[in-house]
Image (tube, grey):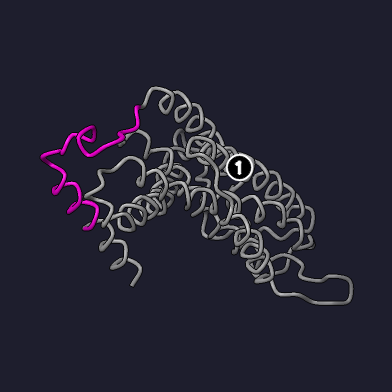
Amino acid sequence: MAPLCLSFIIGGVVVSVGNFFLEQANHLNPQLGKLKVSFTLLLVLYDMVKAPLSKIRLPLWLGTSVAILFSVLCCITAAKVENRRLHAIIAHNLLDRPDDRVPMTLFWMVPQYVLLAVVDSFLEQNVKLFFQHMIPTSSLLYLSLFTRAVTGIGIMGGVLSVFVVGKLSERGGKLNWFQSTLNRSRLDKYYWTVAALSAASLVFYILLSSCYKEPQTEAEAGHLQGRDIYLCAFITIQHSIQFGAY
């Protein structure tokens, strides 16, 4: 189960990338003709897409594959949009004016928000479905804790990925991709990196899931002697995430 969970964790990293989307959207042109809209409209769109998708039930292997595939598409789309934003910043001499509006419409970010909603929806329901199928019946009481722990690890992994990628990007005397302002940063390169990581995760998941035998009964699950230790570990992680949020 642990290797398969890595694919869910990578998916959580992609979901956490949505935090960058908000910061980008906040500095784009919010005009729709003569009407001025808030960038929070993208969050409303996100919820509108996610809600109906949450009702769709796919087989575990297919649903997870769809979530990872759309995470690749989401990161590629985000990278291309960010590259366009950076061109607009350079063209209008805004590199050192991070608080100014970028002359690029907010609605360029609609596709990546739609794709992110698809990722989040299928990932959330398939993590739960995965544990429903894989853990022993006696452990179903802890199902929500398992699900929240894996999602939380993915979000923390997103923070860690920014640190690691930033350190690797500045090797050889190069400029770190993450600077003090968004205009000076190279988020497009980070998005491409996460897209490659997600693509590798998809291949890994397909190969590994084809070899995995789903336990059918409590006996087949093995009555693992160390099960209580693992449950305590997940509960500890879950509470740590909550504490960190506060």
Region in magenta:
213-235
| Nearer to the camera, 129 or 175 | 129
Residue at figure coordinates x 71%, y 52% from the top left: 111
In the image, residue 89 lies at what x, y percent? 73, 56
Residue at figure coordinates x 31%, y 54% from the top left: 143
Magenta region includes residue 229: yes
The residue most toward the bottom is: 35
Where residue 26 sits, quadrant-wise, is bottom right
Compared with 228, 31 (above or below) is below
Residue at figure coordinates x 34%, y 27% from the top left: 213
- In-image side of 32 versus 231 (left or right): right
- In-image side of 13 versus 115 (left or right): left
Q: Residues within 10 Å of mark 1 (few under 14, many from 20)?
A: many
In the image, residue 3 lies at what x, y percent? 34, 33
The residue most toward the left is: 225
Amino acid type shown at disc 1: Phe
Q: Which residue is mark 1?
A: 70
Where residue 220 sits, quadrant-wise, is top left
Q: How many marks?
A: 1
Magenta region includes residue 101: no
- Image quadrant holding the C terminus, namely bottom left
In the image, residue 50 lies at what x, y percent? 60, 59
